[in-house]
Image (spheres, grey):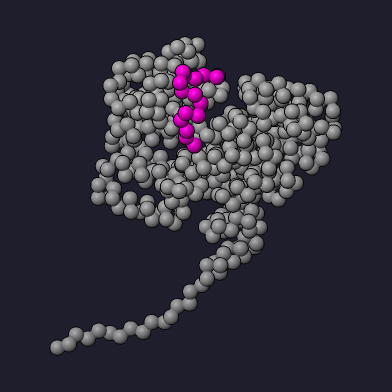
Amino acid sequence: MKLQFPFLTTEKKFQHDEDYFIEIDRKKWREERSVLTATELYSSLFVKGLYDDFEYKETLNYLLSIFDKLPRGTQNLISSEPRQVDKSQTYTTNPDDVRIIIRKLKNIVNIFPTDAMTWVDIAFYYTILGELSKAEKCFLTAWGINKDNSFIARSYSRFLVHLNNPEKAIHVLRKCSQINTNPLVSSAAIAIANSFNIKGREINIGKKLVDSFIGESSFNSDLSACIGTLELMNGNTKKAKILFKKALAKPSENTISQYNWLFHKHNFSIDGLKNGTFKSIESEVNDSYVTQQYEKCRNGLIELHNFQPFSEAPISDAGYISLVALNDPKYVIGMSHNRVPRVHMPFIELNNLIVAKLLSNDFSDIELEMRLLARKLQTSDQKGKGIYLATSGLIFFKTENFEKGVKCYEDAINYFKSINSTRSAVLAEHFYSQQIRDINPNRYASLRKSVQSFAKTNKMLELILPEEK
């Protein structure tokens, strides 16, 4: 007997275009201004990448204006602080491709949950998406599985440094049993401890290890350069030369950059090893900066940005070179305008973009961008307050509110001096002087004298105006 299957008739369902649902969200927002309608429309437009849409900016502005009253999830949605990666020759940064990779890697750890290295890979790809909380959980999982793996410890600690958590970063390295035997771990610990004035035994451990290590010399390169730099700063040039000679036997990228930097900054060199003997992307950036080949320097910074997935410094420095050395704000606008959404843009890059727009007399979305910049102050370093004040001063000058502009710039300069950030104070003086030139010639002359003195002493010649050379 044949089995009888019922015959089902199906109606063809009408499928709405995605824009149809956005229009529904638009209608709700126009009819009622609330957290719910603003969040729904903002999310829809964000997912579609419609960052220039008027109502995208309007809903974002509305949510920022009541930020402290928003649920935690909504706050994270509009004010996350990722270190976004630009396009790279090595790793894909297309969000769709990255998510596919993450899914494949997750399938691996579902089968092999103690595969620590795969957890690190997942963390890396989450950083590309800017999902840092997920990245941190993956790093923590990897580290929990194997605290003694030097690669995991160094990767996790570097990630934590970029999250402005150096104390936890040094804790991770100290927990690694290889800190006493592996120069790579030791040099990383010394670098963090020295940069953030964290007390400990890292330098003493490193000094013992750099002399006793008998393994592959390339592994000892960073540590030799690290200890050598400390010796030079303490006046022991002879010991510094011995250590750098060892470091340069099989140099790492960091060692080459460090040696060339010391050559330019302190005229330090080793007999028979002149600057330029070794080349790296970073060292060539330093060379082109010192020799005032600023366009070449900027190109090198953009190239360097492709190889540093955790760091925002190269693209921020490219913005600085464009604004100060090349007087090219249009380049900054072109570089950053559509690179990532403003809510994901690092503090310095967003500030550079705002300054570039103001110098180009482009006031579009400035109020919205300044609100975002103010929100990002919470995750910026100590200098963020002064930077925000200086940029506010520029806005007031550009809108001919000279009295407020003067106050903001003077407050910024005084603040930078109060935290002993002389370089930042002089940079504020540099921009301030160009706004006050025709308003207060005496103050202009005083500011330029201060800027020129600092620039010549510290070899920051980009701060000297063409007519001053």
Q: Where's the C terminus, which quadrant?
A: top right
Residue at the image point whose x is 78% and y is 38% from the top: 397
Residue 269 in magenta? yes
Which residue: 42% across, 47% down?
A: 90
The relative height of residue 381 versus residue 449 in the rendered view (above or below) is: below
Residue under the image location 73 percent in, 48 percent down: 362
Q: Nearer the viewer, residue 18 or 188?
A: 188
Q: Position of residue 427 (x, y in %)?
A: 68, 29
- Of 464 and 5, nearer the camera is 464
Residue drawn at point x = 49 percent, y = 37 percent = 281
Quarter of the image holding residue 463? top right
Q: Where residue 141 sits in the image (x, y, percent)? A: 33, 39
Q: Image quarter for residue 460?
A: top right
In the image, which residues are magenta? 266-281
Locate the N terminus and report the quarter of the image it occupies: bottom left
Q: Which one is nearer the viewer's eye here, 198 or 7? A: 198
Q: Compared with residue 30, is residue 420 higher up or lower down, i.e. above or below?
A: above
Quadrant in the picture for residue 145: top left
